[in-house]
Amino acid sequence: MIYKRSSALFAEAEKVIPGGVNSPVRAFKGVGGTPIFVKEAKGAYLYDEDGNRLIDYINSWGPMILGHAHEPVVNAVIEKAKKGTSFGMPTEIETQIAELAVSMVPNIDKIRFVNSGTEACMSAVRLARGFTGKDKIIKFAGCYHGHSDSFLIQAGSGASTFGTPNSPGVTKGTAKDTLLAKYNDIENVKALIQANKNEIACIIIEPVAGNMGCIPPVNGFLEGLRELCDANNILLVFDEVMTGFRLAKGGAQELFNINADIVCFGKVIGGGLPVGAFAARNEIMNYLAPLGPVYQAGTLSGNPLAMAAGLSMLNELNNDAEVFNRLKEKTAYLHEGIAKVLTQNNITHTINRLGSMISVHFDEEQVIDFDTAAKGNNEKFKKFFHGMLNAGVYIAPSAFETWFITDALSYDDLDFTISAVNTVSKTL
Ligand SMILES: *Cc1c(COP(=O)(O)O)cnc(C)c1O
């Protein structure tokens, strides 16, 4: 395929935008080459500035679960826009989407809308700290909760006591309050709690990790966290920015039948517009301003266009009893097809999958946490990525990302993809 215009547009962008992009993963640093500029998208397909058509397995990193430019969502936004785009005053549609979200998700009474997943997670942690009166948090290596300071932390030499910043600009003081744990390792979490008795406000986790490939929790892990939290007066925060309204109507809480204390949303809940949200039972949510002492605010929070897109998206999902099953079946079909051709071509691999999340790792071990995900063969992944792109299939430009299956994919698209994997694997 030819990417002449994309390359030219990227060169222009680099002059006025750092790295040419407004979010780093888009720059293709993990795979080499220059990014593709999108012109438009419809259903399962992206159309780039050079006129290439690509089957999209990223879908804006999750939000477009029903495909691009899904008509009810687009129409809802257009109709809303004609009536004004922002007021900074309450609107009825905010209550409508809140009521719907509360009815779909288990164990939440109230929800507050913000503008991104980052904001949702950042606010959830502040609320957990305010509510418990404690400062420290536990996060898991390889889990992503947005780019706020408390989360940009890596395991330090004193990992059992505190982490260290993994970006300049994050202070040591902030890093000291974030403890790093190993995903799927309950003993590790126990030890951290022991070493920091009565200091931990919350444990925040992606209930199915999606930012180091797709890594489901091992049996008993989430249950174990729930028990530890209950026993130690710690709040359990599920970051369902990726899994919410994707794995089931009620997200991972419903799928695993485990209650979190605070749940964060983003991506699907905004139907492709900038939306995040966090939710909990009354007792916790009433701790937020203006009812309670924990401050949190936003000029564009609950923006009418964003709420219109989100409400339409949630309605579509709520009214379609089969959608999550269809997504799961399509993902399973893709998994079987890819596994078969990779095996036939003698390519060492591990495929992880849950619901409509799937990741292909060039790794012979099971991938269960950040360390095992990091062992994958990145050179092979780069070749795979570019081979697939050349065949007209767009997967994430990084080995540490899940693929997001959309309901707009047809079985012909899936067969096309499997056959592309077959062709590409002969070159690996
Ligand atoms: C994408 C993501 C975020 C951050 O959301 P943004 O809208 O990019 O700020 C947080 N948590 C998880 C699990 C995510 O996948």
Image (tube, grey):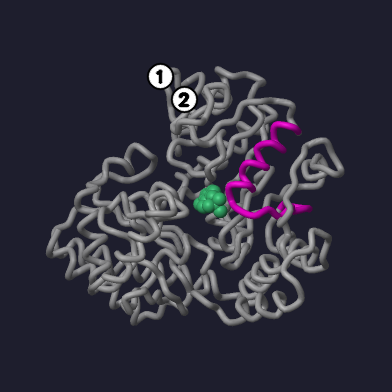
- Mark 1–mark 2 contact, CB under 8 Å? yes
Question: Would you say residue 372 is visible in this rendering?
Answer: yes
Q: Quadrant of the N terminus?
A: bottom left
User: Is the distance from the Cβ of mark 2 to the nearest ligand 1 atom less than 8 Å?
Assistant: no
Residue 271, position in %: x, y? 59, 68
**Disc 2 target residue:** 164
**Disc 1 target residue:** 157
Residue at 78% of width from left, 53% of height from top? Answer: 110
Q: Quadrant of the C terminus?
A: bottom left
- Residue 129 within the magenta-colored segment of the rendering: yes
For residue 76, which quarter of the picture?
Answer: bottom right
Residue 401, position in %: x, y? 39, 53
For residue 372, which quarter of the picture?
Answer: top left
- Residue 401 within the magenta-colored segment of the rendering: no
Nearer-N-terminus badge (1/2): 1
Q: Nearer the viewer, residue 186 or 82?
A: 82
Question: Would you say residue 215 is visible in this rendering?
Answer: no
